[in-house]
Image (spheres, rainbow, N blue to C red):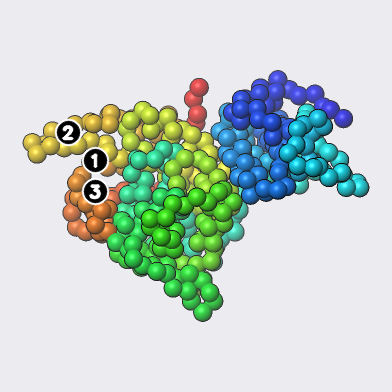
Amino acid sequence: MFRGKSRQTDKVETAIRRALGAPEWLQGIRVKDDGSVTLIIEADPEDMEASETRRVEAEARAMNVKGVGDVRAMLTAERAQGAHSTHEEAPPRAGTQRVHKGARLSEEAVSQGEPGAPTTEKIPGISRILVVASAKGGVGKSTVAVNLAAAFAKLGLKTGLLDADIYGPSAPTMLGTSDAQPATNAEGKLVPVEAHGIHSLSIGYLSDPDAPMIWRGPIVMSAITQMLNDAAWGTPEDPLDLLIIDTPPGTGDAQLTIAQRVPVTAAVLVTTPQEVALSDVRRGAAMFAKTAVPVLGVIETMSWFEDPAGNRHYLMGEGGGRRTADALGLPLLGQLPILNEIREGGDTGKPAAAGETESAKLFHELSRNVALNLDSLQTKPAPEIVFED
C-alpha cells in the first residue's frame, strides 16, 4: 500500500533526487518524518564493487541535503520493468519481488536497512579518538594533525596518529618516516611506527610512494578499518591516551565510514579564513552533526603573515574562522599564522610542535584548548551546532 507523504518529506525527496542527478540506477527513495532516508539503488551483479562505490557516494550526497538525518542505501540486483539491460536478467526467485521505481518496501524490509546508532564500543588499546577534518583540501589539515599529535606527545600523553588519507598520505613525510616499514607482532597485528613520541600508521608505509592509489570506495574503507583495528596501538593495561585520525578532505565515503563505524570521541574542523574554505566548513559540521560526532571547535590556519616590521597581512582574509565558529555555535580553538618554520618542519620531517620555537608554543596552546574541550565532554553535553538559513 502506498502511503501519503507530507509536504516536508516530499520536499526532501525532491532535493535528494536533485543532489543525485536523478540517475537511472536510483529506483526509489523513502523519506520518514524524522528525516531518515532509504535509497533503493540498482546494482550490477557483474560489477558489485562499482555498485558498492555508487551506494557509498549516494549516501554521502544525500547526507548533505537539508532536512536529512540518517541515510541508508540498499542495493537490488533487479532492474525495473522496461529498463534497458546489458546483461540477461534472471527470473525472480520464489518468494521474492522486483523493486520498481516509486514502489515502497515493507516496514520489515526497510527496518533491516535502517542505520543504527553510531558505534560506541571502544577499540581495545585506545582510550579516545580525535578526528581532524576539513571539507576542503589545502587548508593545512595534515599539518595541524601531525603537530597536534607531537604537542600531545610532548605533554607526556601516549599519542597515536592514523593517516587516513589513502590517496594523499603525508604523515610519513611530515614525521620523517618515509622509509619506515611497519613490523607485525606475534598476533599478526601491525606495529605502528614511532617517531617524535608519536605512534603512527599510514598507507604511505605500505605502498610505493610513486604509485597512484586507484582504489574504489569499499577498498578504501577496508584499508582504513584494518589500519585501525588490526594494529597494536596499545593494550588494555597500557592504552593510547589519544589517537588522532587525519582524515581525507571532503565528506565522502572515507569520512562517513570513520564517523559512523569508528567510536570517535570528537572532531575538530580546520579551515583558512578564505570564504571558499569557510563555505565547506558548514558541510563538514553538518556531516558530524548528522552522525552524532561531537565537534569541539574550529581551528583557523594561515590566519595572517607578519612581516619583519611586525605588521600583519591577512592574505587569506580576516576573521573568517571566528565568524564561522560563532555561526555554528562552536569555539574558535586557535589561529595559526603563516610561519616558515611550520612549513620547514613538515618538509624536513621535524614537526614544529616537537621543538621549542614560537610556533611550537602555538601548537602547545592549541593542544591545551583541545584537551580542555575533550575533557569537558565528560561533564557536559557537546556543543549544539546551529545552521542558519
Name the residue: 52% across, 56% down: 224
Kindly identify the amino acid type of the residue bearing the numbered disc 3.
Answer: Arg
**SS at badge 3:** helix
Kindly identify the amino acid type of the residue bearing the numbered disc 2.
Answer: Arg
Front-most of residues 346 and 3: 346
**SS at badge 1:** loop
**Which badge, 3 or 2, is on the more N-terminal residue?**
2
Q: Residue furthest left?
A: 309
Tag 2 residue: 312
Circle 3 Cα neighbour tier, 10 Å, few/some/many (<14 / 14–19 / ≥20): some
User: Within the image, what quadrant is residue 121 found in?
Assistant: bottom right
x and y percent of residue 3 in the render?
A: 82, 27
x and y percent of residue 7 in the render?
A: 70, 20
User: Within the image, what quadrant is residue 62 found in?
Assistant: top right
Q: Is residue 384 above or below residue 93?
A: above
Which label sits in the foreground, 3 or 2? 3
Front-most of residues 44 and 376: 44
Tag 3 residue: 343
Tag 1 residue: 337
Asked if marks 2 and 1 touch (Cβ < 8 Å), the reply is yes
Asked if marks 1 and 3 touch (Cβ < 8 Å), the reply is no
State the CA–CA distance, disc 1 to disc 3. Answer: 11 Å
User: Within the image, what quadrant is residue 75 found in?
Assistant: top right
